[in-house]
Image (spheres, rainbow, N blue to C red):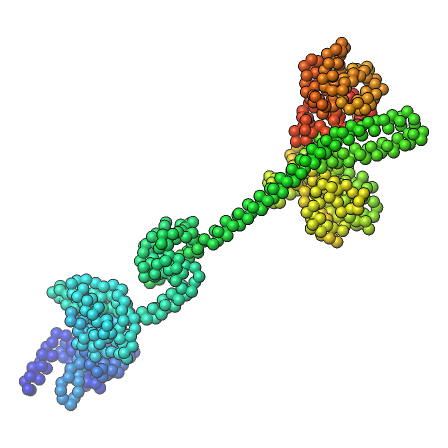
Amino acid sequence: MHWTVRLADGLLEVAPDALVVTGDDGRIRLANAAARDLFGREDLVGRSVDVLVPDDGPSMVPRLRAYMSAAHPARRPGQPLSMVRGDGERFLADIALSVVEVGDESGPLLVATIRDTSAAGFDPVQSLLASIVQSSHDAIVTTDLDGLVLSWNPGAERLYGYAAGEMVGRSKDVIIPPDRRPDEAEIRAVVAAGGRVDRYRTLRLRRDGTEFTVSMLVSPLIGPDGRTAGVTTITRDISDRERAEAQMQALLDAAPDPLVGVDERDRIVLVNASAERLFGFPRFDLTGLPVAALVPGGVRTAPAVARRKEGGEVPVDITLSTLNTDDGVITLASLRDMTERLAAEAERRRLHLEAERQKDEVRQQRTQRLESLGQLAGGIAHDFNNLLAVILNYAEFIVEDGADTPFALDAEQILRSARRGSELTHQLLAFARREVIRPKPLDVNRVVAEVQQMLTRSIGEHITLRTDLAEPLPTVVADPGQLEQVLVNLAVNARDAMPAGGHLTIDTGLVLAGDEHSVVRDGLKPGPYVRIRVSDTGTGMPREVIEQAFEPFFTTKPSGEGTGLGLATVYGIVVQAGGTVHIYSEPGVGTTITILLPASDAEPRTDDAARAARPPGRGQTILVAEDEPALREVTTRILRRGGYTVLAAADGVAALQMASEHGGPIDLLLTDVVMPGMLGRVLAERLQRLRPSTRVLFMSGYAQPVLTSNGILDPGVHLLEKPFTGPDLLNAVGDQLAAVPR
């Protein structure tokens, strides 16, 4: 026995590695020659192990005692440790520990094998790897192919609750739930064949018996001979992660919209309950599918459709966000079913089109009413203006021939009434857009300024008139007389709405109408418009009145005090000029009429200076064609009194016959526009083929359908509008005879 001990001591003494043996009190029992040489000290035995480490470091005694007190301490692989030589030189050493039971009263001994890492032959890489294993937060466990534990790092001690000494040499089944052990055997078989298992998720047991979820990397343990000697498992507790994932899944499932998570390979890695309902697949069938199988073209396309299990397609709107996870970047797609929204939009479009159709019908009905009224107005105007022309001129004859007589005074009353009738006729034609207009570029501000004095007299002293004219303004193309009529009509309406007095304001400005402007919604083109706004502080109008304000013959005035044509005439004139008009009114507050007319870049044209009266005729021959006998007679009488020779015919056929039989020149044809059998224009064309030098002057109370385009006189056409007075007729005839030939 003694020789065996002596032999063991001798072997330790000559061992190449530095060996230091201590008891549980931390005192060195043995230090072999290699240890004494390494530390440069012969007095190690009996001293505390703390002499081997620097003074400024922690004591080694408690750490060694804790290791030795473990239930089943096992050999601990090498770990790096800072140590000190006898002369104070520090060095980094690699220490491996093991506990030896000697079987006597001295108790177990701790054997430390120490290697200087700077010494020749020391493998620093191997030492570093051992250090990494020891310091890893993950549980790193090696087993043989039968599942017996070969190594158990501190991470495994923390994770499972077992010390290394308790597990080395035992079956790994201690930490595996019984129902998972068959899976573990299959994995060991895979590894024994050289395979690996990455990110294997399973359950494990702690020392207290609780189960928890782990993720493992399983790989072969290769021995010195190059063969698989066992299994290395790196394990991480993912219970917290699973709880977080469960919470996240609960949040996803609570979302009303379908959510789909897509990895960097465009495969589905997560879905929520709404996505299951949208696609018609359970969650486990969706996970792993390429997203294009459900959303053709992928989630990054728009517009998109989602394919359902039964084969139908659902239009979806997709919004994207990204998540950075341990598994890489996940694109989270939120898919909103657009079926109801698109149906609602389609319904809105249908309702909008229906509303537009109804508006078109209303506009068409209004146009048809205006057309019917226009035809009626034209017929009335033609006959009525003929009568008024006769009345006006015979009344003038009485005034001229019986000056200062009672008959002349009576004739003046007849003239005033006839002129009033003429104004009503023109107003009716203007409303129906049947009056011949003579548009030209106008300065709106100048028109307002010229009519302001007349308006002041018309509205009375109890109303204050104010103008606010923007400068500069582009011109508008309109008939100056009609534009003045618009202002007068609006001012008179405002006056009637302010019987107790008030304020009337006329202001002008420039409006740039975009695609959403009311002008465009009324069917006009976008662009610049000149605005004329007439505002009063009168009684205002309720909504039901506003809706009918532009209707012809509609009036809120007592019987006999209004014709109902004022605003209707304004509407007709403005629309004929290419513009639009709107009313804003509140009862008790007042009314604002806004007129928008297309702007023009033409220079404004002013009225010609007042001309001198035409000299009497010199016997020139005038052929008169008029089917109304009384008017033909009065026209002939005026012309003859004016110094002209007159040939009078009742219609176009008679006029052509008279022209062919007349031997002398015919200087001017004065013809009615509308006559039975032959229109005035046809008569003029045929006569000028016979007599090219004969000039033509038309006369009519309703010439628009025959002589004009859009209410404007055709080039070269000269018109005398009925009812006319003697001076009107003589001036028009004189102008035409004196005009320079074209």
Q: Residue furthest right?
A: 405
**Considering only vertical position in the picture, is 633 above or below 34?**
above
Give how far across and how far down residue 219 sits, in percent. 20, 65
Quadrant (top left, top right, bottom left, bottom right) of the C terminus: top right
Identified at 60% across, 39% down, the residue is 525
Apparent side of residue 57 relative to residue 539 in the rendered image (left or right) = left
Residue 707 lies in quadrant: top right
**Considering only vertical position in the picture, is 557 above or below 691?**
below
Identified at 36% across, 58% down, the residue is 280
Q: Nearer the viewer, residue 705 or 667?
A: 705
Q: Nearer the viewer, residue 722 or 489?
A: 722
Query: Total of numbered circles in the picture?
Result: 0
Determine if residue 134 is in view.
no
**Considering only vertical position in the picture, is 100 above or below 491?**
below
Give how far across and how far down residue 475 sits, in percent. 68, 36
Q: Residue furthest top?
A: 663
